[in-house]
Image: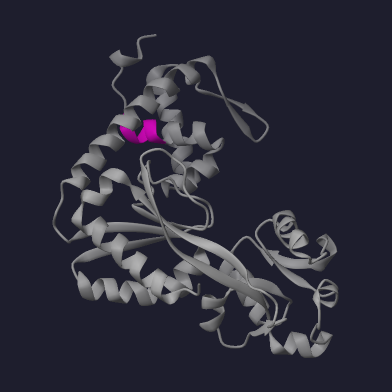
Amino acid sequence: MNWNAINFDWNQARSFLATAEEGSFSAAARVLARTQPTVGRQVAALEQALGVTLFERVGKSLNLTTAGAELLVHVSEMASVANRISLTATSQSQAVEGQVRITASDVVSAYQLPPILKQIRLAAPRLEIDVVAANDIRDIQRREADIAIRHVRPTQPGLIAKLVAEATAHFYAAPSYLEQVGRPRNEDELAKLGFVGFGDVDTMIGFLNPAGIEVTRKNFRIGSQSGIVSWELVRQGFGISVMSDDVAALTPGVERVLPEREPFKFPIWLATHSELQTARRIRLVFDQLANHLGSRTNY
C-alpha cells in the first residue's frame, strides 16, 4: 500500500505513534496528556481510514501488525520532521515571553522549584511556566519538555547538559517514629527498622546494600511510586528514608538519622536541546535554574 497517497489526521497519527512506542493505550495517553478512550478511538479511526489493522490485541498487550510496522516507519519520519520544525521556530524566538516547560521529579517540583520560579517570574513576568512533575525521564528531543532537571547525565545526541551542583542526602524520619522504635546508633541498628519505599523497592535495596545498610524487602512495608506521598509517609511516622538535605530543610517534622554519617552525594544536571539554547526565553530559564540550584544546594 502507498502510505504517502493517504491523507490522515495528525492527531490520529500521534496516538498511533505513542501507542506503538509505549505498548498500550493507557501509557500512550499519559505521554500525550489525553484520556485512554480518546487514544483508542483515534487509533481505531486511523485503522478505519487506512482499511488495515495496525495492532493485534494479545491479552493486555498490543503488538504491531506488518501493516502497523510499515506505517510506523513513515509516522516516525513525520514526527522527526515536525520536531525539527518546532525546534527551529523556537530557537529563532528572542522574546522573553511564551511557554517554557520544565520537567523534574515530583519532590523537586514541589519543594525546590517554587522559590526559584518566583525569581524567574520577577525577571520575566510575561513567561508562562509549565512544570511537568514526573519521576520518569521525559524526552526533550520529542518536546515533552524544554528543560529537564535530572540526577543522571543525559546522553542523547543533540542535548546540552550542565552539571550545576552535587547535592547531599541523609536518612530522615519523624521524631515520633524514632521515639517509638529507638534512635539507631549505627548502621546495623538502622537496618533493623522500617523503611518507606520510594518507587521500586529492589532499586532502593540495590542502592542501600552497597552503602552498608543491609536491608531486605522485609524492611519495606509501605511506600509509593510518588515521591511526595512517600516523603509525607516519612513525615507522618511510618518509617525511615533517604532524602535530599535541601528538601528535608524545607520540611517541618523530620529528624536526621545517624547525623554523623557521611552523606550520600548525587549530581544535579540541567539538560536542554542544543537548538533551544538560542531561544532567549529558554536560555533565561536555563541560566536562572543553574544559578539558583547551584547556590541553594549543598556541595
Left or right: where 105 falls relative to 10: right
Task: Give residue 147's position: percent from left, percent from top.
Answer: 36, 55
Q: Nearer the viewer, residue 12 or 272?
A: 272
Quadrant where the N terminus sits is top left
- Give the image location of residue 23, x and y in percent: 56, 35
Most foreground residue, 240 or 106:
240
Region rendered in magenta? 9-14
Q: Is residue 217 above or below residue 111?
A: above
Residue 221 vertical position relative to residue 139 in the rendered view, above or below? below
In the rendered picture of this protein, how many numbered marks are placed on residues? 0
Q: Is residue 248 above or below residue 154?
A: below
Task: Characterize the magenta stretch by its predominant secondary structure.
Answer: helix
In this view, the residue in front, 24 or 95, is: 95
In the figure, is residue 235 to the left or right of 188? left
- The location of residue 79, given as percent across then percent down, is 34, 32
Quadrant location of residue 212?
bottom right
Q: Residue 32's x, y, as percent?
A: 42, 45
Coloring scheme of the render? Answer: one colour
Q: Quadrant of residue 294?
A: bottom left
Q: Residue at x 44, y 73 (%)?
A: 112
Assess whether residue 112 is covered by the magenta stretch.
no
For image coordinates 13% across by 57% down, the residue present is 95
Most extreme residue toward the top is 1
Q: Is residue 10 magenta?
A: yes
Determine the residue positioned at 21% across, 40% down: 88
Q: Residue at x 43, y 16 (%)?
A: 51
